Amino acid sequence: MIEELRQRLQALQRPPGLEDDPGTVPLGLGMVDQVLGGGLARGALHEIAAAGEAHMPTAAGFTAGVAALSCAARGPHAGRDDKSVVWVAEDMALAESGAVYGPGLIDIGLAPERLVTVAVAHRRDLLWALEEALRCRSVGVVIGEMRGGALDTVAVRRLSLAAAESGALALLLRAAPEGDASTAATRWIIGAAPSAPNPYGLGAPCLTAQLTRNRRGPLGTWIIEWSESDARFVLATHAQPVAQPVSHRPHRKIA
């Protein structure tokens, strides 16, 4: 009954420009998708924050992986296989973290020719570009990369409404978690995690995903790997390494 009431409320709140449910982007993780109600909701804003500045590449990789899954999604509501991905970044973000790497996008399953990158000098330009991209019918995913600082609640609300009207997936990538108010459907904190031991070299990329806000259900924390062979997320099954106890060393005698 509660789920039925929730669906009715969502239907009443749906903007007139969106005739049906835009669907979700399943992450391919049964436990996580169940918590999310099927996956990350399209037509909504989602915040992805790095656990710290050093974890920004990991958070960016998670964001790119979500965008790739959105582009590859099939089904009655997907229909966005031929749409572009727009990545808007502040100049400071590009100076500190660099731009996205084409061959890396291919490895993650996102064709570089489908990515449109935009560099802006000021925060207001970032928010304006994100809103304009969300209102473009040829865009399926919009990513905004920004550094620290609280967001204007009115601007975030406008982004959420623009995403709802177009049915696009809006991802806001932040360099550090913030506690400011937000209309985002979900809020994530992403950090790097040790990979599984591999006798042939480096193991699969691994990260810790903490869901701290979820309008559809409970919260949670998971350790996730990226499977390069089939370009998808998988739940890590290996135990995380712990520090070994220091072996006993008798005190040396001083002559």
Image (cartoon, rainbow, N blue to C red):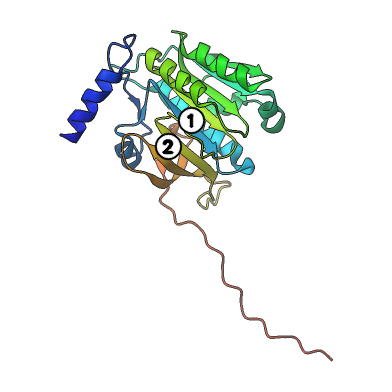
* Helix, strand or loop for disc 1: helix
Is residue 70 in sight in this rendering?
yes
Q: Nearer the viewer, residue 204 or 245?
A: 245
Q: Quadrant of the C terminus?
A: bottom right
Looking at the picture, how far across and down is residue 115, in whole percent? 55, 17
Q: Are marks 2 and 1 in contact (CB under 8 Å)?
A: yes
20 left or right of 44? left
* Helix, strand or loop for disc 2: strand
Looking at the picture, how far across and down is residue 59, in whole percent? 54, 36
Q: Nearer the viewer, residue 182 or 120?
A: 182
Instruction: Give the crowd class for mark 2: few <14, some 14-19, many >=20 residues within 10 Å.
Output: many
Looking at the picture, how far across and down is residue 233, in whole percent? 42, 37
Residue 233 image label: 2
Q: Is residue 192 above or below residue 47?
A: below
Amino acid at pointer 1: Gly
Instruction: Give the crowd class for mark 1: few <14, some 14-19, many >=20 residues within 10 Å.
Output: many
Looking at the picture, how far across and down is residue 132, in whole percent? 52, 11
Q: Earlier in the sequence, mark 2 or mark 1?
A: 1
Residue to which mark 1 is pinned: 65
Q: Nearer the viewer, residue 169 or 165?
A: 165
Q: Quadrant of the N terminus?
A: top left
Residue at image x 31%, y 34%? 216
246 left or right of 72? right
Specify the farthest residue to the bottom: 255
Q: CA distance from mark 2 to mark 1?
A: 8 Å
